Amino acid sequence: MVKNLITIIIIMGLITIVAMNVLGNEKETTKTAETAKKTETAATNDKEDTTYQVEYVAPDFKLKTLEGETVRLSDYVGKKVILNFWATWCPPCKEEVPHMQKIYEEYKNQGVEILAVNVTNKDKGEEAAAQFVKEHGLTFEVLLDEEGFAGSTYQVLSLPTTYMIDTKGNMIDIIEGPMNEALMKELINKAE
């Protein structure tokens, strides 16, 4: 009961922060909309983007790694972070992990981090996650969301769901469904 109350309070606080940011930027948005009407570009003819473009501070969380260490998302400010929510039973998750591993190997020394959050509370447990990581030879950071707090905070409804976070800790894109290497490279290049 107390945990549920704390979770509700935290979620309400996050909603309040987002609402304040939206209301504070309303005047600027109006000016930007007027400018956009005056200067239309050929970009409207581009193909439809399948990602959701957002820009606000990514909510912080604290989770345990498979090695038992505790990390916070805020520990990675200064790096580009691909934050991926997944489960061992999820076929699209299995489809994208080889791509994630290749991208991690290519970009790990260039300020890019992959945080793969196992939705442990909806999966088969820590041992299943560890076995999955071993079978797929994953070397990027795997975190365990044992109580479902991170998944709830990020409103993860389907798996896999990925959030691209820039070096300032701002969430800039949300991708629902599996990613390939080309999409991940595009996201990395868009992040500052």
Image (spheres, rainbow, N blue to C red):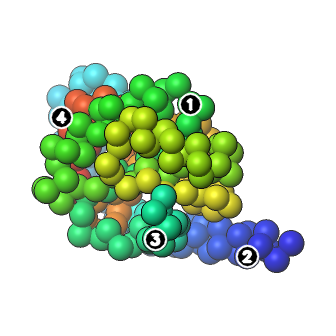
Seen in the image, is 12 located left or right of residue 61?
right
Q: Position of residue 90 (x, y in %)?
A: 56, 30
Q: Earlier in the sequence, mark 2 or mark 3?
A: 2
| Amino acid type assigned to the residue bearing label 4 in the image | Thr
Circles 4 and 1, Cβ within 8 Å, touching? The answer is no
Judged by depth in the image, the label closer to the viewer, 4 or 1, is 1
Circles 3 and 4, Cβ within 8 Å, touching? The answer is no
How far is the residue under mark 4 from the one under mark 2? 47 Å
The secondary element bearing badge 3 is classed as: loop
* Residue 41, disc: 4
How far is the residue under mark 3 from the one under mark 4? 49 Å
Residue carrying label 1: 90
Image point 20% across, 44% down: which residue?
105
Quadrant for residue 14, please give it: bottom right
Q: Residues within 10 Å of mark 2 (few under 14, many from 20)?
A: few
The secondary element bearing badge 4 is classed as: loop
Q: Residues within 10 Å of mark 3 (few under 14, many from 20)?
A: few
Q: Outermost residue toward the right?
A: 1
Tell which of 171 and 29 is nearer to you: 171
Quadrant for residue 32, please give it: bottom left
| Amino acid type assigned to the residue bearing label 2 in the image | Ile
Image point 49% across, 39% down: which residue?
132
Q: Earlier in the sequence, mark 3 or mark 4?
A: 4
